[in-house]
């Protein structure tokens, strides 16, 4: 029996969220709707300029793991934080939410990572991320015993900016598969797909059973404007390929077939975490033996819930929603 149903490895980031008009973004030189990497001095400047800050333990995969844990599975998140105030906050918050954090805060040089997220009136999120201690994760930070019994491993593209992260991912995927489990990855961002194209393509082909991304990420990864062509290339080397499409039906490719699941279009209050929570519902479905269509429907429900409020994690009992809709 596996120790954990789903284990995530990613950048342990404290999300600092506030609302901001487009004029503020222009004044501060923030490019709307994308993730920008920033240095420590700029991180401090933006933090001081935020109004009504809400701080939560974040990071793309950590948000997904929290969503899966809220649905009742045994979860663990492996990230790296400094033994500072934000690092202790991060570890304590995960423990309180029921997610194991096997790599406790350490006395490392760089501060705990943080991302200043400005939510504009149309719900778009503009992320300004300082990659502190979290970006230095290596194989030494991944305890081998967490993979005992298998389960599902979920990895995030954001950690590919350093070679140590790439190595940690490949080794962790091999350890999980040796234990009888499966490995999955999220592409994270078009800029990640562009920066690490060859590494992502290799990882998806050689080490991953499941790959998740949005339409822009997939087309960037395979350098084409034809989404079908991009997904076909991915599906030729990876068992399950999922694509979210910003309000359009979700596509899942597997075993030579394409599944389409509609979404209910709404104007988001905050799009932060939409992709993360789609992954939570989708991976929950796969981990509990659901068929691909049901798993994708679960992902759509989770994404729909999270864009209806500020913050990247669910605020309602989504398992109860699944039951109401006959999915479990």
Image (cartoon, rainbow, N blue to C red):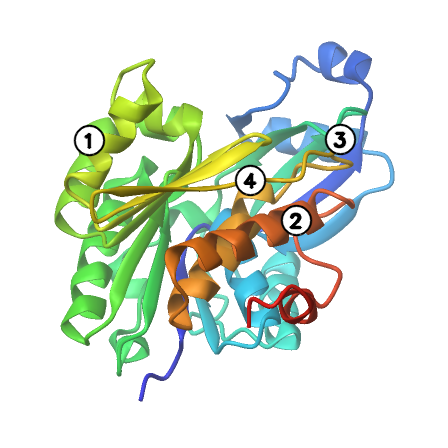
Mark number for residue 233?
1
Mark with earlier residue (4, 2): 4
Mark with earlier residue (4, 3): 4
Q: Where is residue 279? Give x, y as percent.
A: 48, 52
For the residues carrying marks 1 and 4, which lies nearer the camera in this image? 4
At horizontal 20% and vertical 50% (from top left) the residue drawn is 167
Q: Residues within 10 Å of mark 3 (few under 14, many from 20)?
A: few
Task: Read off the residue under disc 4.
Answer: 262
- Taking depth in this image into account, of 308 and 189 the one nearest to the observer is 308
- Taking depth in this image into account, of 136 and 25 the one nearest to the observer is 25
> Seen in the image, is 297 located left or right of residue 136?
right
Rendered view: 326 above or below 108: below
Mark with earlier residue (1, 2): 1
Rendered view: 224 above or below 141: above
Inspect this view and state whether residue 291 appears. yes
For the residues carrying marks 4 and 3, which lies nearer the camera in this image? 4
Mark with earlier residue (3, 2): 3
Q: Quadrant of residue 66?
A: bottom right
Mark with earlier residue (3, 1): 1
> Seen in the image, is 49 located left or right of residue 282?
right
For the residues carrying marks 3 and 2, which lies nearer the camera in this image? 3
Q: CA distance from mark 3 to mark 2?
A: 16 Å
Q: CA distance from mark 1 to mark 4?
A: 23 Å
Task: Read off the residue under disc 2.
Answer: 312
Rendered view: 101 above or below 204: below
**Helix, strand or loop for disc 4:** loop
Task: Read off the residue under disc 3.
Answer: 267
Mark with earlier residue (1, 4): 1
């Amino acid at each position: 029996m596996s120790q954990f149903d789903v284990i995530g490895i990613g950048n342990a980031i404290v999300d600092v969220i506030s609302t901001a008009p487009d004029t503020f973004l222009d004044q501060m030189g923030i490019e709307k709707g994308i993730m920008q990497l920033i240095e420590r001095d700029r991180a401090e400047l933006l933090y001081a300029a935020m109004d009504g800050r809400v701080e939560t333990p974040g990071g793309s995969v950590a948000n997904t793991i929290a969503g899966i844990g809220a649905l009742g599975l045994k979860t663990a998140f492996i990230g790296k934080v400094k033994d500072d105030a934000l690092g202790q906050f991060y570890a304590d918050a995960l423990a309180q939410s029921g997610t194991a954090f096997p790599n406790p805060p350490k006395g490392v040089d760089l501060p705990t990572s943080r991302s200043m997220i400005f939510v504009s009136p149309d719900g778009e999120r503009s992320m300004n991320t300082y990659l502190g201690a979290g970006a230095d994760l290596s194989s030494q930070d991944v305890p081998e015993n967490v993979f005992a019994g298998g389960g599902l491993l979920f990895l995030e593209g954001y950690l590919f900016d350093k070679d140590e992260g790439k190595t940690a991912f490949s080794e962790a995927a091999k350890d999980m598969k040796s234990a009888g489990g499966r490995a999955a990855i999220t592409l994270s961002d078009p800029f990640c797909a562009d920066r690490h194209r060859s590494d992502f393509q290799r990882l998806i082909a050689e080490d991953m059973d499941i790959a998740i991304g949005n339409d822009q990420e997939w087309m960037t990864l395979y350098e084409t404007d034809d989404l079908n062509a991009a997904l076909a290339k991915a599906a030729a080397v990876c068992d399950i390929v999922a694509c979210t499409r910003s309000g359009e039906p979700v596509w899942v490719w597997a075993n030579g077939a394409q599944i389409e699941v509609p979404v209910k279009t709404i104007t988001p209050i905050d799009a932060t975490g939409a992709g993360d929570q789609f992954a939570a519902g989708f991976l929950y479905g796969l981990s509990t033996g659901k068929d691909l269509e049901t798993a994708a429907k679960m992902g759509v429900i989770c994404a729909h819930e999270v864009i209806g409020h500020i913050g990247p994690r669910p605020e309602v009992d989504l398992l109860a929603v699944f039951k109401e809709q006959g999915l479990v």
